[in-house]
Amino acid sequence: METNRGSEGILSEGMSEKREEIVELLKTAYFMELETVMSYVTNSVNPDGVRAQEVKESVEEDIQEELTHAQQFAARIKELYGVVPGSLEFSAEQAYLQPPEEQTDIVHVIRGVIQAETGAIEHYTRIIEETDGVDPVTQDMVIAILRDEQGHRRLFEGFLRECEVSGIS
Ligand SMILES: [Fe+2]
Ligand SMILES: [Fe+2]
């Protein structure tokens, strides 16, 4: 039995320390996604005005995608023998996605989304680096998720550009 453990890659007994390290990174990612779900629900409802409609719809579309990401991170934590954390372990960090003073301030929302997506891009890039050569399955999953986040950010960068061009940012 013992002799075969080394051939199990990241699930090998000798890899337990690295596995725990990856699980910690995945827990952070899991909570980041759930906070994003919360923030996007908020910001898909609050904004007022003609300009806000397109942004609200895009934010709303992303909610399901971010929720799916959270579920993917949770499943991977379990597969790596970790325990998905409970809500009491959660602490909020997205100060920049709180409701603005004026609900017509759509630029505030656009900038907030860009910041949330940038945070995800940075953290997931780190997971891809940390899993390189040791956990290709996690790496593969996170690469696909990273692409979604890059797409989200690019869309909102376009919204921001439009606001800049029309002088409302
Ligand atoms: Fe996400
Ligand atoms: Fe995203």
Image (cartoon, rainbow, N blue to C red):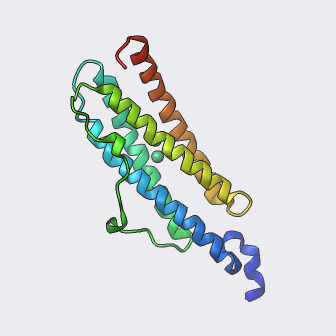
| Quadrant in which residue 91 is drawn | bottom left
- As drawn, the residue found furthest toward the top would be 166
Q: In which quarter of the image is the N terminus?
A: bottom right
Q: Which residue is drawn at 24% across and 25% down?
A: 104
Q: In this view, does 139 lie to the left or right of 34?
A: right
What is the total number of numbered labels drawn onto the structure image? 0
Image spot of residue 28 (x, y percent): 47, 59
Image spot of residue 63 (x, y percent): 37, 43
| Quadrant in which residue 30 is drawn | bottom left
- As drawn, the residue found furthest toward the bottom would be 1
Above or below: residue 40 compared with residue 1? above
Q: Which residue is drawn at 48% across and 63% down?
A: 27
Image spot of residue 113 (x, y percent): 40, 36
Q: Nearer the viewer, residue 122 or 9?
A: 122
Above or below: residue 96 compared with residue 161? below
Q: Quadrant of the C terminus?
A: top left
Q: Residue at x 54, y 61 (%)?
A: 25
Above or below: residue 107 compared with residue 113? above
Q: Nearer the viewer, residue 154 or 166?
A: 166
Image spot of residue 31 (x, y percent): 41, 57
| Quadrant in which residue 86 is drawn | bottom left
